[in-house]
Image (tube, rainbow, N blue to C red):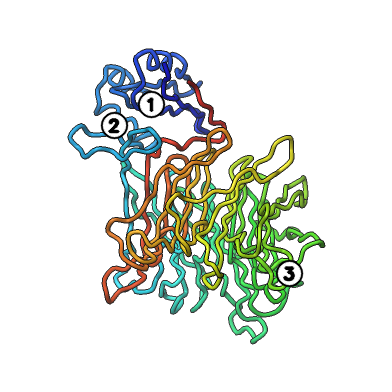
Amino acid sequence: MNRPAIRTGRLRLGFICALLASGADAASLASFKQQAMVADSEHPQQLIVDDGHVALASGARAGAVQAGNSSAIAAELADTMSLAVPDPGAEPARRVSGYDYEFPDTKISNPDAAAAADTFGRSVAVAGDTLVVGVPRDDTVWGSNAGSVRVYVHEQGAWVFQAELLPDDGGAQDFFGESVAIDGDTIAIGAPYWEIPGALSWQRDAGAVYVFTRKAGAWQQQARLSLPNSITGTANYLGSSVAVAGDFLIAGATGNSNFRGTVVEYERTAEGWVLDNGLDIPVLFEPAEFGYAVAMHDRTAVVTSLYKQGSTDFGKAYLYTRGESSWTFRYYLYPVNGTAADGFGKSVAISNHTILVGAYPSDSQVPPGPGSVFAYWSSGGEWRQRARFSPVDTMPQDRFGASVAIVGDNAVIGAPASDDPGVNQGAAYVFSRSSGSWQQETKLSDPAGSEGDGLGNAVSMSGPVVVIGIAGADRSKSETDTGAVTVHQGFPAIFSDDLEERL
């Protein structure tokens, strides 16, 4: 008898989340419960299966959960992973890859009273129970298009506004919030058009990165990071892209040296954030817009560059690792059998030993392509392209791959120009990897959306939470591009990097 797979994945919080494929027989259930029991030295916890659904049980509610009390299960889930337990009276849950779970989607719209063209959701980042949303065209006390960032936290089953972040020294047209990244209680924010007050014409649009930290629930600006004095010239656009991991931060300055681009790196020390050596570009390459997209995982960083007109360099991703005192270039990743038409390097994400690079061609490309994602992972210390994938319903000029996010064996990809259901309304796709092959699981869209929303312009993942930016969402016919984000919680296919399958 063929039994559906039972998947378990160990999460970093010290407990195990288990999700059971629908239709498992009694023997599978019994075996699963026996295998999945887990204890933590400080917080003993058990996995309980109730009517085919899985919950975590701990503390005072454990007995009630073991007794099959569905309300206790719901309360436990709300406190731990924010996964929803289906209500028997509710509409059927959406089916994803053989798993029946309810997805409590939340849509957060731009709260500003005067929000036209704010592009709320232009950038997004999520880590644990904290969500960061960039609003780079927000008009603030610093002027038109100065930009802002909104922070939300997940409390008692809902995403609640926590803070609006503004720089201490902003200015009009800074586009603060064009890029965002979060790691724990640290947020990095790019303002690529920031310039020194009173800057001369050749100093304009230098760009900056702001760092905010949270203590006791309050966010404070910790630093404004700028380019070293050795990098001069106009339109450097520092903060076009940002990534942060622990005490390390990298930022792209794509306009540097006539759009050759550069990436600078900072380290947090006892004295504050210190400019470290930048990430060197191997002399073999002459990229365009080096730093277009950046990503970090622990002490590994990935940087992309785009196609350079008239060059044989069709765009690449560069892999660096951090040693005791500096970053070292290790590998370059390229599209196997790639061409300039691929548009390789538009986005990048890394999770442990896997890197995803998004690629889509320009709208002027003939014939226009829909976009794709290239997957790389290491084996024996060597990084190689292992897959290239696209949705089953992709169409030309969808811009699939404009944004990518990955957690373990699961990924979310944005296609902001998808015409399903409306022209350029946008979509995001969930893929999962099994036996080295990436399979489409589901397609996410906004049923309340409209043409030109561009859903999927930005995506982010953290555990079972997926966040999707809709920067072009309209509040009304007269208030366009106000922006929004959707939050999808409880994805059953999302685990940590040490996923395993059991039959």
Q: Is residue 346 visible?
A: yes
Residue, x 76% and y 49% (percent of image)? 330
Query: Which residue extends farthest front?
Result: 367
- Classed neighbour count for the residue bearing mark 3: other residues with Cα under 10 Å, few (<14), some (14–19), many (≥20): few
Contact, CB < 8 Å: mark 3 with mark 2? Answer: no
Q: Would you say 374 lies left or right of 75 here?
A: right
Q: How many marks?
A: 3
> Of discs 3 and 2, which sits in the foreground?
3
According to the picture, the residue beneath numbered tag 1 turns out to be: 56
- From the top left corner, tell me how far across and down residue 200 is, in percent: 65, 86
Of 116 and 317, which appears nearest the observer?
317
- Specify which label sits upstream in the sequence, 1 or 2: 1
Instruction: Please say if the residues under marks 1 and 2 sit with CB atoms less than 8 Å apart.
Output: no
Tell me the number on the disc at residue 311: 3
74 above or below 273?
above
- Residue 445 falls in image quadrant: bottom left
- Foreground mark, 3 or 1, reads 3
Residue that badge 2 annotates: 74
User: The residue tagged with tag 3: helix, strand or loop?
Assistant: loop
- CA distance separating discs 3 and 1: 55 Å
Residue at point 53%, 41% (across, down): 438
Q: Is residue 271 visible?
A: no
- What's under tag 1, amino acid-wise? Leu
Q: Quadrant of residue 345?
A: bottom right
Callout 2 amino acid: Ala
Front in this rendered view, residue 194 or 422: 422
